[in-house]
Amino acid sequence: MNFWDRVSNLDRRILWAVQMIIVVAILLRPIGLPIAVSSETQLAYDFFDNLPPGSIIWADFGTSGAALVELGPMIYAFFTQAFNNNLRVIGGTLWAEGPAIGQIIFEEIQEEFPDVEYGVDFVNVGYKPGTQILVRGLVDDVFEACRGVDYFARPLADYPLMQEVPRLTADYVDAIIVFAEGSPGGREWYEAAAGPEGIPLIQGTIQMSIPEAMPFLRGGQYAAIIPGNRGAAEYEFLVGRPGEAIATQDANSAMALWLITVLILGNLGFLLGKQGGGKK
Amino acid sequence: MRKQGPMILGVVAGIIMIFSRYIFIGRNLGWDSTWNTYFLVSTAVASGLGVINLTRIHWKNIERRTNIVPSAVLLISLLGYSILGVGWTVASGPARWIYEVGNLQVTNALFSLLAFFIFSAAYRAFRVKSLESTTLLVVAAIGMMGTAPIGAAIHPSIEVAKDWLLNVPVTGAYRGILIGAYLGSFATALRILLGLERAHMSGGD
């Protein structure tokens, strides 16, 4: 095995060790590279910015702990923008873990907005099974579809915010935002509620699902998307609440550079070594 | 009758759903909402059935003394968390504490490990072996560099190229895949409604 063969077959433990050192070093000493805001994120930010105070947004925190690193910062930024603009939020999700995550983030954000009150500015109706069938049920009757109780099993009718939203239609809800780790996600909400009822739909998506969301954005079915971890950083920047997503962008840059370096080395090794027919 | 029964049930349910969802009279009769309730009840029953089956299988494992530890952990988690959830609701109390300090952190950490595996997999897979693999390598490199802020810092055209890739070829190809998938689903649904599709009823003949 010559030098180039060794380069083309580096031990993955070496790759991982360098990867870890780079990420930790960059997180401890960020470089602060500028982040340009994409048109997609700007569209989402402008949409919520243009909603009149008091507007009601239905939010699906469709994530588990796995995608929290991407969708969590988006949810923080969304709550910040919503409560800065006096928008009201109803959380109702198609993912079993979603309500817990939404509630944890809401309670943290509530410390920054002491005037925000559960039941008046935010209600968490929790998880209900049924995907599109549930969403259709919400369109017909929110109270019946939610069995009349919220995430804490308290009566929905007791909350002033819920008294204004008997049905999930454009008459009562101004927008739907879906923070989607996967399926069910934006597509299910679009097919069962946003599309038929004419409610604008915004999707916060993980990096991996951007190609899946793009046809719906370009086709006009989605009003906007917040694309992945990078989109979350842009959203944090626009909202003026720098958080985890912005903090990780330098690490993303360093990782991309390290991977490109390794790919170039690996391919040089492949071409110049025995495998690629190089000098034997 | 073992096959005709479910087949007739499927056809009748499908026709009623179409009638209640897409035909004006059906919508006015409110069948849509009634059938939605039936569906939700069926989902709950199916989930309950799943829990019973899972419990049976892992209880047998413990009795036979095979895979005792994983089976015991699964049963304790499943039943214990259910009891806590029913007792205090999952929104507060010990169920929420376990979720926050346990489940949330573990799933987060496990998913983060993917970054390492994807890295080494990319190193081994992205090789200039053929025109196709070279194209994949170039597109992946542009996508990666264009998404990270470093791409624009090196040259603004990297981000422009990434946006073009995402907006034109990727969106076009994905739209084609989606239309194909929808047409496939429609054809399958039609075959079930006509009683031609029987693969989902155990046999396949």
Image (spheres, rainbow, N blue to C red):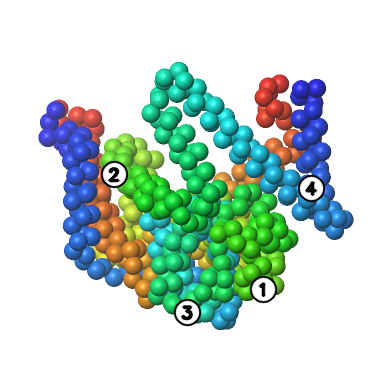
Could you confirm whether marks 4 and 3 are on the same chain?
A: no
Task: Please state which of the two labelled residues, at mark 1 or mark 3, is closer to the viewer.
Answer: 3
Using the numbered discs, state the Cα–Cα distance from disc 4 to disc 3 in whole angstroms.
47 Å
Please give the label number shown on residue A115: 3
**A26 left or right, relative to B80:** left
Identify residue for label 2.
B116
Task: Please state which of the two labelled residues, at mark 4 or mark 1, is closer to the viewer.
Answer: 1
Three-letter amino acid code at the position of disc 3: Asp
Using the numbered discs, state the Cα–Cα distance from disc 4 to disc 1 in whole angstroms.
31 Å
Q: Is residue A223 visible?
A: no
Q: Which element type, helix, strand or loop, lies under badge 2?
A: helix
The residue carrying pointer 2 sits among few (fewer than 14), some (14 to 19) or many (20 or more) residues within 10 Å by Cα, namely some
Q: Chain of mark 2?
A: B
Q: Quadrant of the C terminus of chain A?
A: top left
Identify residue for label 1.
A164
The residue carrying pointer 3 sits among few (fewer than 14), some (14 to 19) or many (20 or more) residues within 10 Å by Cα, namely few
Choose top left, top right, bottom left or bottom right for residue B161.
bottom left
Three-letter amino acid code at the position of disc 4: Ile
Residue B78 in the image: above or below residue A159:
above
Could you confirm whether marks 4 and 1 are on the same chain?
A: no
Three-letter amino acid code at the position of disc 1: Glu
Q: Residue at x 53, y 31 (%)?
A: B54
